[in-house]
Image: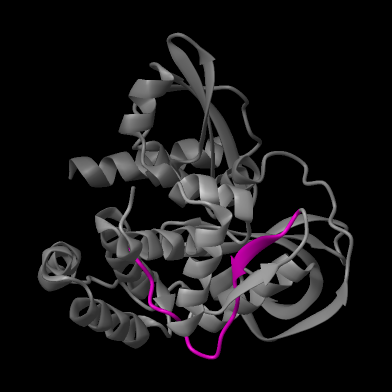
Amino acid sequence: MLTASSRLLRLIALLQSRRYWSGRELSERLEIDPRTLRRDVERLRELGYPVQASAGVGGGYQMGGGAELPPMLLDDDEAVAVAVSLRAAAASVGGIEETAMRLLAKMDQLLPARLRRRASALHAVTISLRSGEPMADADLLTRSAAACRDQQCLRFGYRDRGGRVTQRRVEPMRLANAGRRWYLVAWDLQRGDWRTFRSDRMSGPLQAGPRFTPRTPPMDLAEYVKQAISFSPFEYQLRIRLRGSMQELSKKLPPWAGMLEHEGPASCILSTGADSVEAMAAQLMFAGDFELVERPAWLPQLQEAIAVLGKRVTV
């Protein structure tokens, strides 16, 4: 049986972990009767926790939104996860680095000594090596996420690879993160098709419009985004056969090389793309020995580009 103090801490943790709990579920988790549970809930309210209750057979409890944020309970793994996530976000999302550092400093002051030492270790010894500007803006991401959640159309400016800016109207579905880049997956109302939009090419102000009924995506969204950002958007596309298992080639090829598909126990198909023939030639240097699955019309230009690149390497 938990002590009263331990039971209250456990009750807070349960209420923060899920939106709604029935009284029966909480009583079973805490191994107490409903009357004791009601007394514990009253103690939490006295401490400033906005616990809301609903009566009746299906009655239950949930943590409400109060004027002040109650303290959170973090176990060791959760505290370390927060520190790692804040560090990663500060390096890839613009506009939150100062806020992230302030939050890490607050964690350092509030956590117990044992937990503080482990959670602050990453912050204390890590150097952020930022290459260029952040690939996403925090305000743009939160507004895009809100539109996805609330199923509201979005209007924004979008810059293509050539630098041309057009106004886009979309039905946003999900945000996708791939390393330092963020993408908005949405149904493009003007094109009448699914599209992925790089967040660093989106420009405001983002304008939320009317609500919409979500459409069924063409495939698993993670797979769709992977295909869209590694192959589909490029002018020059190539499919090649590589010798080796999926496991071997996945370790060898960099993530940006393209989409790797299993073909057999000893071969895979790589679908890759580039903005120019010269870029494609350079990209193929990572592939090693390969066979063409299809012969594109621009194959002579590719062969010439590979030959020129080969001469430069041997000089």
Q: In this view, does 311 lie above or below 170?
A: above
Res. 137 in view: no
Q: In which quarter of the image is residue 254?
A: top left
Q: Nearer the viewer, residue 51 or 66?
A: 51
Residue 185 within the magenta-colored segment of the rendering: no
- Position of residue 58 relative to residue 243, above or below, is below
- Using residue 158 as the reference point, say whether residue 217 is left or right of it: right
What residue is at 63 percent from the left and 33 percent from the top?
296
Q: Write the residue at 63% across / 73% down.
A: 52
In magenta, the rendered stretch is 58-74
Up-down: is 289 above or below 51? above
In the image, what residue occupies the spot 75% across and 54% down?
A: 58
Residue plotted at (47% across, 35% down): 303
Residue 26: % across, % down: 54, 53
Residue 190 position, x and y percent, is 87, 67
Image position, residue 54 (x, y; %) = 72, 67
As rendered, which of 44 and 14 lies closer to the eye?
A: 44
60 over 150 or under it: above or below? above
- Left or right of residue 127: residue 292: right
Q: Using residue 130 as the reference point, say whether residue 56 is left or right of it.
A: right
Asked which colour scheme the image uses, the reply is one colour
Residue 204 visible in the snapshot: yes
Q: Main secondary structure of the magenta part?
A: loop
